[in-house]
Image (cartoon, rainbow, N blue to C red):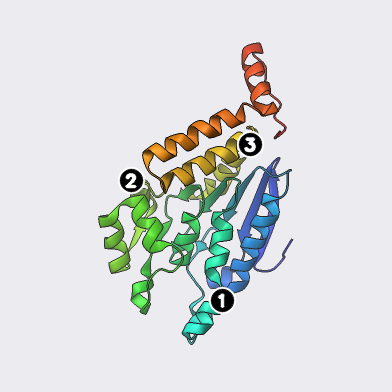
Amino acid sequence: MSTLVVITEQPAPGVGLIRINRPEARNALNMAVRQLIAQHLSAMADDDDIRAIVLTGNEKAFAAGADIKEMAEASTIDMLLRGTQKLWRTIYACPKPVIAAVNGFALGGGCELAMTCDIIIAGETAKFGQPEVKIGIIPGGGGTQRLPRTIGKYQAMRYVLTGDLFGARDAWQMGLVSEVVADAEVESRAVAMAAQIAELPPLAIEQSKESILRGMDASLETGLTLETRTLQMLFASQDQKEGMAAFIEKRKPKFIGR
C-alpha cells in the first residue's frame, strides 16, 4: 500500500478502495498517480478476495485534471513516451466493476478517469468538465470519445468547445452520473453499492460488464449474439447451479466464483 499519492484500503468484505491522495494539488493526475492507479487496479483484478472496486479522491476533489506543471514544457516525443494511453487502457480494461465516488472537482483528466469507471456516484456539489481547450489542447484521455457516447454529440460539443463546467444534477440528467447523493454520503454509498455487488456471483458480474462494454461497440445483432452465448456459457458455472437452487429452496446463496 502506498502512503504517498495513492492509498489503498479494503473498507468492506470483497471491496477494494483506491484513493487519490494529492490534496495540495486537488488530486491532479501526475504520472505517478496514473501509474499507481493502474498498478493497484491490476493487482485488485487478480485478487480473488476483491470483487468490486471504488475509486475516489477527497471531499474537495476527485481529480481536478492532469498535472499541468508536469507537461507544460513537454515536446511531442515527451508526450508519446509518457505512454498515458496504455495506463488508461489498463484502467478501462479492469474486469471487475469499478465505481467512481466523486466529490468536488472531476475536470479534464479527472472527468475522463471517472468515465473509465462503470458506475459514477456524485456528490450534490460535484463539478464535471473538459476545460482543456482553455489551455490550448484537447481532451486526451477519452473526453472527445466517451463524453459524446455518453451524453450525446450536441451536449459534448457544448462542453468540450467552451470548456464550461457542469454540476452533478446536470450530469445525472445527461446520463453521465449514475446517482447523486449528499456530499457527505458519496464514499459510503459507493462502498455500500460495491459491497452489494461483491455478494453476487463474480463470473456473472464480470461477464455482464464485458457484455455491455463489448456490445456498445458492436451492432445490435452482434451484441445480442454475444449476450446469448455468454448466458449459455454461465450455465456451466457452479454459481449458476447454486443461485437457482437457492432461489428454489428460498435460502441465501453462497457464491464462490466458479
Mark 1–mark 2 distance (CA, rounded to whole Å): 35 Å
x, y percent for residue 246: 66, 18
Q: What residue type is disc 1 on?
A: Arg
Q: Can you tell which mark lies on residue 160? A: none
Q: Can you tell which mark lies on residue 173? A: 2
Is residue 181 shown to the viewer in this render? no
x, y percent for residue 32: 63, 72
Query: Relative to residue 197, is residue 143 drawn left or right?
Result: left
| Among the 4 quarters of the image, the one containing residue 139 | bottom left
Q: Which residue is rendered at x = 72% and y = 32% of the image? A: 256
Mark 2–mark 3 distance (CA, rounded to whole Å): 31 Å
Q: Tag 2, which secondary structure?
A: helix
Return the residue at label 1: 82
Q: Looking at the figure, which quarter contains the C terminus?
A: top right
Considering depth in this image, is 232 or 170 the residue closer to the camera? Answer: 232
Q: Residue furthest top?
A: 249
Given contact means CB atoms under 8 Å apart, are the residues at marks 1 and 2 in contact? no
Q: Looking at the figure, which quarter contains the N terminus?
A: bottom right
Q: Tag 1, which secondary structure?
A: helix
Q: What residue type is disc 2 on?
A: Gln
